[in-house]
Image (cartoon, helix red, strand yellow):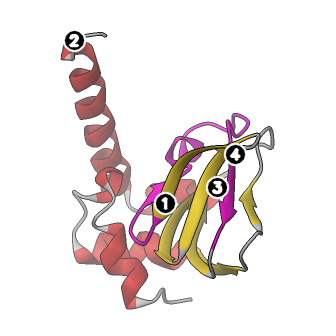
Amino acid sequence: MPASSDAVSMIGSVPIFAGLNENQRKAVASEGKEMSYSPGTSIVKEGTMGVGFFLILDGKAEVRKGEKVLANLAKGQFFGEMSLIDDEPRSADVVAVAPTKCWAITSWAYAAVTKEHPEIAHAMLKELVKRLRKAQTSPTS
């Protein structure tokens, strides 16, 4: 199913997908699914297995640990990128606080698209290596 033009263009703003050309972004976007959440609805729950990546196309959400709000997320922001690589449990809840539309891709859909388009996996690896290098050279506090 073709993804919306919003999803295709916004995928390019996500650091792990920033190196992809438009055709590659379309390939990734077509493997995902757009979902809508009402205010107060959990998008992901702490402790559940993380099997997907989410990009907020519209709306607002909060990252929560118990009752504490750790972060506010809005259009263009994302969460769950580590779940494309591993299936570890979620470390926090993410809850819609306004009507929210997300594009999401599961780890197995991502694996399928990278098998068909290995250059997509390579672009992600380049970004992850960049992050590791930055983390290794950043001063600790």
Mark 4 vs mark 3, foreground winner is 4
What residue is pinned by disc 3? 108
Mark 3 vs mark 1, foreground winner is 1
Residue 63 location (% of width, % of height): 61, 50
Q: Which residue is drawn at 53% across and 77% down?
A: 59
Left or right? Give the position of 133 relative to 34: left
Kind of residue at disc 1: Leu
Is disc 2 surrounded by few (<14), some (14 to 19) or many (20+) residues within 10 Å?
few
| Quadrant occupied by the C terminus | top left
Ranked by sequence position, the earlier of labels 2 and 3 is 3
Q: Residue at x 65, y 79 (%)?
A: 35
| Quadrant occupied by the N terminus | bottom right
Dot label at residue 50: 4
Q: Which residue is drawn at 53% across and 41% down?
A: 82
Ranked by sequence position, the earlier of labels 3 and 1 is 1
Dot label at residue 139: 2
Mark 2 vs mark 4, foreground winner is 2
Is disc 3 surrounded by few (<14), some (14 to 19) or many (20+) residues within 10 Å?
some
Q: State how far apart marks 1 and 4 are (Cα).
A: 18 Å
Kind of residue at disc 2: Pro
Is disc 4 surrounded by few (<14), some (14 to 19) or many (20+) residues within 10 Å?
many
Kind of residue at disc 3: Trp
Residue 97 location (% of width, % of height): 64, 69
> Disc 1, disc 2: CB below 8 Å?
no
Kind of residue at disc 4: Gly
Q: Which of 19 and 13 is in front in this view?
A: 13
Dot label at residue 73: 1
Ranked by sequence position, the earlier of labels 1 and 4 is 4
